[in-house]
Amino acid sequence: MSTILEGLYYAESHEYVKVEGEFGYVGITDYAQHELGNVVYVDMPEVDDEVTAGEDFGAVESVKAASDLISPVSGTVVEVNEALNDNPELVNSDPYANWIIKVRLSDPSEVESLMDAEAYKAAIGE
């Protein structure tokens, strides 16, 4: 059973965004990290890069697979989680505390097209 937090927005590609004001914290869901297994590398964009909803912005590599990261929102990267460079396994220990990028949202209404916790639970069959 995966941990799915209320108050976050979820994409079908298993990324989440936590919105705080004009910013969104983007990471992978608990379900995604379970499916990937032990994460060994996280490829992240640079600060000031633009991300577009529905398009890839990096990748997560595990001992089992590599998976593109698809941005659930559009905006400008204002911070990357530097801790993941040396400790990518933090994504496995707590994917919601260990977000991957912080984005200044260019269109906050985009979150309306994402799933809430209940819809995401249904989408993954939990």
Image: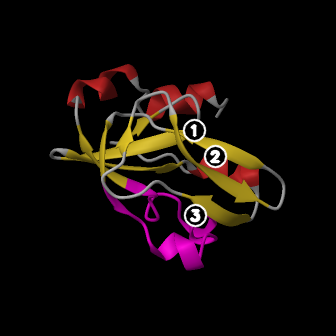
Write down the residue under mark 1.
14
Q: Are there few (<14), some (14-19), or many (20+) residues within 10 Å of tag 2?
A: some
What amino acid is labelled 3 in the image? Val
Answer left or right for 87 relative to 4.
right
Image quarter (top left, top right, bottom left or bottom right) of the C terminus? top right
* Contact flag, marks 1 and 2 (Cβ < 8 Å): yes
Quick check: 61 above or below 105?
Answer: below
Q: Residue furthest bottom?
A: 86
x then y, percent, for residue 17: 38, 43
Q: Secondary structure at mark 1?
A: loop
Residue 95 in the image: above or below residue 17: below
User: Pointer 3: residues within 10 angstroms few (<14), some, or many (20+)?
Assistant: many
| Range of magenta residues | 78-101
Q: Front-most of 39 and 31?
A: 39
Q: Which mark is residue 99?
A: none
**Do the numbered discs 2 and 3 sit on residues whose CB atoms are within 8 Å?**
no
- Residue under pointer 2: 31
Where residue 50 sits: x, y (%)?
35, 41
Q: Residue at x 52, y 31 (%)?
A: 120
Residue that label 3 marks = 91
Residue 6 visible, this orientation: no
Amino acid at pointer 1: His
Q: Is residue 99 left or right of residue 41?
A: left
> Residue, x 53% and y 59% (percent of image)?
95
SS of the residue under disc 3: helix
Q: Is residue 24 magenta?
A: no
Q: CA distance from mark 2 to mark 3?
A: 11 Å
